[in-house]
Image (cartoon, rainbow, N blue to C red):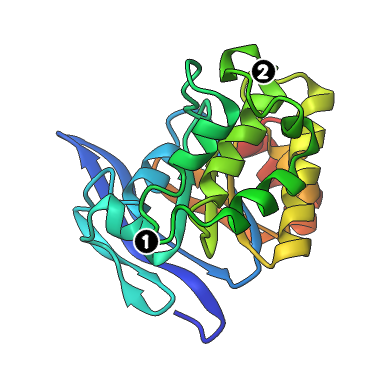
């Protein structure tokens, strides 16, 4: 773990039965970093996030967050340490209102009735304000993704992990979501890890990138360098 790293992953491995989904993955995410984790389907991206947040058990390696070993912590304790996870598809509860979904994000906070964070989150996502009392089923795909991000922010995290936030969204909406994440980092100092198959879009807004292939890190470096590296793009990123 380098001195400035908020999240340090050291030789992380994880399996599903006989299938090794992660094989010695190491990465370092600095505080206030905006980092992309890229790769094709089956590369290990989702397993990486699930293992970082305790939803899947690591078979080897270590995860350090703010200097603490969180490798074996249950998910609720990972959340209280300040690591939030927005799963693929967002996972909003469509029968609940926007406000009810947001307040679920504060479940593990001792001061969950405090209105300050709720008001701050609503300020970040103006399209949700007028829909506050509407059920999530009435939201567009982009608005649901905003709601999922907002719900994660209700836990007051130090770092936010997002799994494929562009999935199923139109290109223009995807660009808006990516820009929103960069603005969120710039405005709040939040550390963001963006897992994506949309490599070009993710690299256009992030500072640094890691490319996974068959559960291992195949390439890493500054985002603009990965964008300019024809070999890496053609071999692993499909553009």
Is 109 on the left or on the right of 99, as rendered?
A: left
Could you say where residue 138 lies in the image, as x and y percent from the top left?
64, 12
Quarter of the image for residue 237 reads top right
Along the viewing direction, whichever of 230 and 212 lies nearer the viewer: 212
Q: Camera-side residue: 112 or 192?
A: 112
Label placed on residue 139: 2
Marking on residue 110: 1
Report if residue 194 is visible in the image: yes
The answer to whether 101 is drawn above or below residue 152 in the figure is: above
Q: Which type of secondary structure does the marked residue at label 1 adopt? A: loop
How many marks can you see?
2
Alpha carbon distance from label 1 to label 2? 30 Å
Lower position in the chain sequence, tag 1 or tag 2 = 1
Determine the residue located farthest toward the right in the rendered image.
172
Quarter of the view holding residue 26: bottom left
Q: Nearer the viewer, residue 4 or 59?
A: 4
Give percent across and percent down for residue 39. 55, 38
């Amino acid at each position: 773990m380098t001195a400035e790293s908020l999240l340090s992953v050291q030789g992380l491995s994880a399996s599903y039965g006989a299938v090794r989904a992660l094989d010695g993955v190491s990465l370092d995410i600095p505080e206030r970093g905006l980092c992309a984790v890229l790769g094709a389907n089956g590369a290990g991206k989702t397993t990486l996030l699930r293992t970082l947040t305790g939803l899947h058990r690591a078979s080897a390696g270590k995860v350090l967050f703010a200097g603490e070993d969180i490798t074996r912590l249950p998910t609720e304790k990972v959340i209280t340490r300040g690591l939030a996870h927005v799963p693929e598809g967002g996972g909003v509860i469509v029968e609940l209102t926007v406000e009810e979904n947001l307040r679920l994000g504060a479940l593990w906070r001792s001061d969950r009735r405090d209105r300050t964070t709720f008001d701050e989150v609503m300020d970040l996502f103006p399209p949700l304000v007028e829909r506050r009392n509407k059920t999530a089923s009435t939201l567009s795909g982009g608005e649901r993704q905003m709601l999922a991000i907002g719900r994660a922010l209700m836990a007051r995290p130090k770092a936010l992990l997002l799994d494929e936030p562009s999935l199923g969204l139109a290109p223009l909406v995807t660009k808006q979501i990516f820009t929103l994440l960069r603005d969120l980092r710039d405005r709040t100092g939040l550390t963001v890890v963006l897992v994506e198959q949309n490599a070009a879009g993710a690299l256009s807004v992030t500072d640094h990138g890691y490319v996974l292939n068959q559960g291992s890190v195949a390439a890493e470096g500054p985002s603009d360098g990965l964008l300019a590296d024809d070999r890496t793009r053609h071999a692993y990123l499909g553009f």
